[in-house]
Amino acid sequence: MTPPRSPWAWVPSISFSQAVPYVAVMLLSTVMYKNLGVANDDLAFYTSWLYLPWVIKPLWSPVVDLFGTKRRWTVLMQLVASMALAAVALTLHLPQFFALSLTVLWLMAFASATHDIASDGYYMLGLPSQHQQAAFVGVRSAFYKLAMIAGQGGLVYLAGALIAAGKDPVHAWSVVFGLTAALFLALCGYHQLVLPRPQGDRRTGTTGALWTDFIDTFRSFFRKPGIVPVIGFLLLYRLGEAQLLKMAAPFLLDPRAQGGLGLTTSEFGLVYGTIGVVALVVGGIAGGMAIARFGLKKAIWPMLFVMHVPDLVFVYLATAMPENITVIAACLAIEQFGYGFGFAAFMLYMIMVADGEHKTAHYAICTGFMALGMMLPGMISGKLQQWLGYQHFFIWACISTLPAFVMTALVEIQPGFGKRQDQ
């Protein structure tokens, strides 16, 4: 009999795999299109549409249960994502590269969202005990964040280094996406070999019964007490941040004559993709500790301020236009720390809303609203920036944080939720 495979053989690598296509779709595409001369309005509008698969992800989650095992879906979606990454590298050399590469990124986004559905379910089957799941939750988070740093920092830095060495941006980004495709294909092959085959990982239910349960699950979510302010909170908590994040890369990369800071692609990968992500992770850890100490109800207002007030650093950067890379990095670290700190409250609020029967499906619905709250503001951010200019756009983004304060005042939070219970 084959001995059980250690979770260390597959939990870190799957967590890493979950982040790579998301980073490629949501961040690498923005920097790449900026390097290739795509205008801010087109860049923001079309890349924001790439959020849609995560918005509607709960709608096709039953398909994963109906057809095949979660293990099979996980490996298959990694194969699709690796092929899509390679296709992006190829389409960049074609005359209609923008439309073609967006189409491929759209496919990759659907594969990534489906991979999330399958792999999250697989974790629960591969780690059947709550003790194991709790023991590896930190490992999952760490390797997901490591992939973000490798993508936003390492891959962007590599593209910038190739451009600085005299390579055409098309060639540089083709190399980056080609290498990422090779890495992901290797991960796919590795997982096909090492992933355990849990006994519970099989098709569940019939089509009719599954869709009936699916409809009942959705109905029960929208019948939750106070669901209107709940949805408003999910949509508006990051209204300002959604616009700011979409324009952060163009602002940092645009030449100073156009109101940007004129960073090279490598500098961007260092200060935003590496230092910024590290600050984001530290902020998230600090936010989790604050909630554990005081509970979500007491902590959410301070966390709300810590998340949104640092957005003012972009107003400062667009006004003072500092040239010192250390000053720029410090400002971005402050803003990203605040974002990570406040986002921890948002994540725990979704857990609170989803708690109860169907909590896994209800949490997926919450994340769909969360993605919609990023998608819609992001779509108009490019037009707004071109109309207002960077300085006034960032002022507008700060004003756009006010609805988050209004919705926080309207929602009900359970006393003591999230607070550590000392034994």
Image (spheres, rainbow, N blue to C red):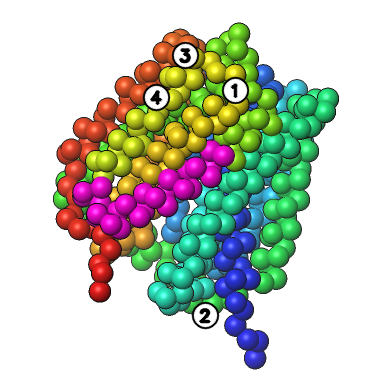
> Disc 1 designates what residue?
324
* Residue 319: x %, y % from top left: 47, 13
Q: Quadrant of the N terminus?
A: bottom right
Q: CA distance from mark 3 to mark 2?
A: 60 Å
Q: What amino acid is found at the position of numbered circle 3 in the picture? A: Thr
Q: What amino acid is found at the position of numbered circle 1 in the picture? A: Asn
> Disc 4 designates what residue?
312
420 relative position to 8: left or right = left
> Disc 2 designates what residue?
199
Q: Earlier in the sequence, mark 1 or mark 3?
A: 3
For this orientation, the residue located farthest to the bottom is 1
Q: Earlier in the sequence, mark 4 or mark 1?
A: 4
Q: Nearer the viewer, mark 2 or mark 1?
A: 1
Q: Nearer the viewer, mark 4 or mark 1?
A: 1
Provide the secondary structure element on which disc 3 rests.
Answer: helix
Q: Quadrant of the C terminus?
A: bottom left
